[in-house]
Amino acid sequence: MLDPERTRIDKRKKLKCPICGSPPADDVKPFCSKRCQDVDLHRWLGGAYRIETDEAPDDMANDPRTDERENRWPPDREKF
């Protein structure tokens, strides 16, 4: 049974675009525009958003399961 003294929680929160704070558009939710969506994607791809870890970045280089040829750039043409 619901408590009449308790304030009702509005299930439709007022969402805002995470980039600029404007109300979101239905076709690009949670963003307000394609531009803000692209800005967010650029931040992810550029490394602005990161997940912190304890591992050193060169841990994969010392992994015996990786083949030295797989880590070279540009890759060997015979692989393709």
Image: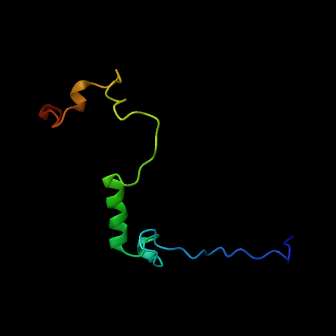
Q: Quadrant of the C terminus?
A: top left
Above or below residue 45? Residue 4 is below
Q: Quadrant of the N terminus?
A: bottom right
- Is 51 situated left or right of 80 in this image? right
Total marks placed? 0
Q: Nearer the viewer, residue 25 or 16?
A: 16
Q: Nearer the viewer, residue 38 or 54?
A: 54
Q: Nearer the viewer, residue 48 or 2?
A: 48
Residue at point 27%, 24% (across, down): 67
Above or below residue 77? Residue 25 is below
Q: Nearer the viewer, residue 42 or 30?
A: 42
Q: What colour scheme was applied to this rendering of the protein?
A: rainbow
Above or below residue 73? Residue 9 is below
- Is 72 situated left or right of 43 in this image? left
Q: Residue 66 placed where, x, y %?
A: 31, 26
Q: Residue 23 placed where, x, y %?
A: 48, 79
